[in-house]
Amino acid sequence: MNACALMIPILLTAAVASAQIPGPAAVPTQDAGVARAVLLDKPQVRVLRVEIQAGATRKMHTHDDVRFHLFLPITGSIEFTKGTEKTAAVPGQVFYMDKGTLHGFHNTGPSVAMAFEVFIRDGASTAENMNEIDALALAMAFASMPPPAPLDMTKKKD
């Protein structure tokens, strides 16, 4: 199965992400002001929630132990750098990186910014693993959805 087919269910996450992100507390990384919480860690997929304090930077780095990697901004103002290209990342946007792609990010806003990072590891293309990846995507999508607005029961049906 190709990378695009793997990404489709995961990309649904970006469309419904919000500031209400449940899960474990984030722990500091080697970069000051950047913390992460491991939401899922399986042999085929790893998902992190990254919290970036105002003005903090995740230094340029690569991931050589994955097939590909997704970066999904959730809240705040993030400048995302891939190679030499800098982009003002918008919540709901998705950045795709193949194995070994040099990248980093910086919080340009006045408050904490958050993002999901999804790492699809080598060997994640079997049908058995796809069920877990699909389940992960749906779980992230539902967990990230804002609560629905209350129904207006005063309106009459047409």
Image (spheres, rainbow, N blue to C red):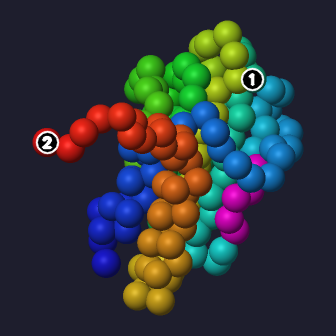
Q: Is 3 located above or below residue 13 in the figure? A: below
Query: Which is closer to the viewer, label 1 or label 2?
Result: 2
Instruction: Residue 116: give x, y in percent of width and height.
Output: 58, 46
| Residue 84 in view (yes/no) | no
Q: Which residue is the site of mark 2?
A: 158
Q: Amino acid at mark 1?
A: Gln
As helix, strand or loop, the secondary structure at mark 2 comes to loop
Q: Residue furthest left?
A: 158
Q: Quadrant of the N terminus?
A: bottom left
Dot label at residue 53: 1
Say which residue appears at 46% left-offset and 81% top-offset.
Answer: 131
As helix, strand or loop, the secondary structure at mark 1 comes to loop
Instruction: Residue 71: give x, y in percent of width and height.
Output: 51, 44
Mark 1 crowdedness (10 Å alpha carbons): few <14, some 14-19, many ≥20: many
Instruction: Residue 113: give x, y in percent of width and height.
Output: 64, 27
How far is disc 1 from disc 2 in space, using C-alphas?
Answer: 49 Å
Residue 129 is covered by the magenta coloring: no
Q: Amino acid at mark 2?
A: Asp
Q: Examine the image and state in which quarter residue 58 appears.
A: top right
- Position of residue 25 in the picture relative to residue 62 (left or right): right
Say which residue appears at 63% left-offset and 20% top-offset.
Answer: 107
- Range of the magenta residues? 37-41
Q: Quadrant of the C terminus?
A: top left
Say which residue appears at 63% left-offset and 63% top-offset.
Answer: 46
